[in-house]
Image (cartoon, rainbow, N blue to C red):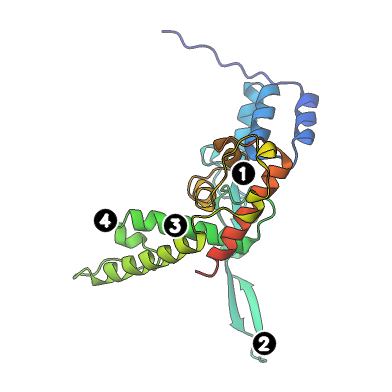
Amino acid sequence: MMMKPFDYRRGDPEAIRRVERETRGKPFEERVRALAAVMEEGDRIDLAKRLGQAPEACGSDAPHAAARGAMKAVETVTVRDDGKGGTVYETIGYRGRAAMRAEDALDRIKGLTEAQRAAGRRYAALVEAVEAGGMKCSGAFMQGGMGGGDDGRCFMDAYIEDCNTLRRMNRAIGDGIGMPVRRVRPSDRGTKASIHDRALADMVCIGGMSILGVLKGHGWTDTGRNAKAATCALAAVLERLRAC
């Protein structure tokens, strides 16, 4: 069977720039759909290559990998005594470079603090660690960094500690509905269905969904007011998780 020849066509640059301006600040999925409508195959490949580039702070020799998606630079900072009774914050990356990690759904949600995003990632990591607790060799991935010893007690201690922390987080999330969500009338939602805090946290932190995806998953209309209400409710949940 003959394969279709590759066509590296590009769309109208002015149309692409116009869509980029019009969708700036909108949810990630909405921007991608709008851009895909005016892009040709060559434009989409160029976009994938740009997204696969490592951040400049990570160094010029950081490998390029289009399949891994967008990356974020992460500074590794240490604190030491300056010898005068004060403290000094220093970056300790190799040759002053930053590390990098994959960009996630929490990065794309505006209005959250970095501490709240960190709490959401910790919650997702704990869920994964606890669910994998019964699998062989999973002890090395526990949150406490403790692998299984010869008698297994180290693994069990780490596993029990993670289970207890996850229990506290689940209690902090609760089974209720956030006040910002409850204040939205069904006529503004487009449905009588509500969004529970548990579903909101799990869909974003664990499922990697955007606020737009959460709204559509519950049948809500995609409006700025509804997105703001869901974002405020998520911020309140993440703030409670910070204390766990």
- Comparing 23 with 70, the one in front is 23
- Gap in angstroms between the C-alphas marked 4 and 1: 32 Å
Marks 1 and 2, how far apart in space?
42 Å
Left or right of 144 in this view: 35:
right
Residue type indicated by callout 1: Ile
Q: Nearer the viewer, mark 2 or mark 3?
A: 3
Residue 125 rendering spot, x and y as whole percentages:
44, 57
Q: Nearer the viewer, residue 180 or 56?
A: 180
Q: How many circles with numbers are drawn on the protein? A: 4
Q: In this view, does 128 lie to the left or right of 71?
A: left
Amino acid type, mark 2? Gly
When the figure is inspected, residue 66 is found, relative to residue 147, above or below; the finding is above
- SS state under label 3: helix
- Determine the CA span between mark 1 and mark 3: 20 Å
Which residue is rendered at x = 50% and y = 48% of the image?
A: 199
- Tell me the mark number nearer the camera, choosing from 4 and 1: 1
Residue 69 x, y percent position in the rendering: 56, 41
* Among the two numbered marks 2 and 3 on one chain, the one whose residue lies closer to the N terminus: 2
Residue reaching furthest left?
151
Residue position marked by numbered label 4 in the rendering = 134
Between disc 3 and disc 4, whose residue precedes? 3
What's the residue at 52%, 45% (across, down)? 208
Q: Is residue 176 left or right of residue 73?
A: left
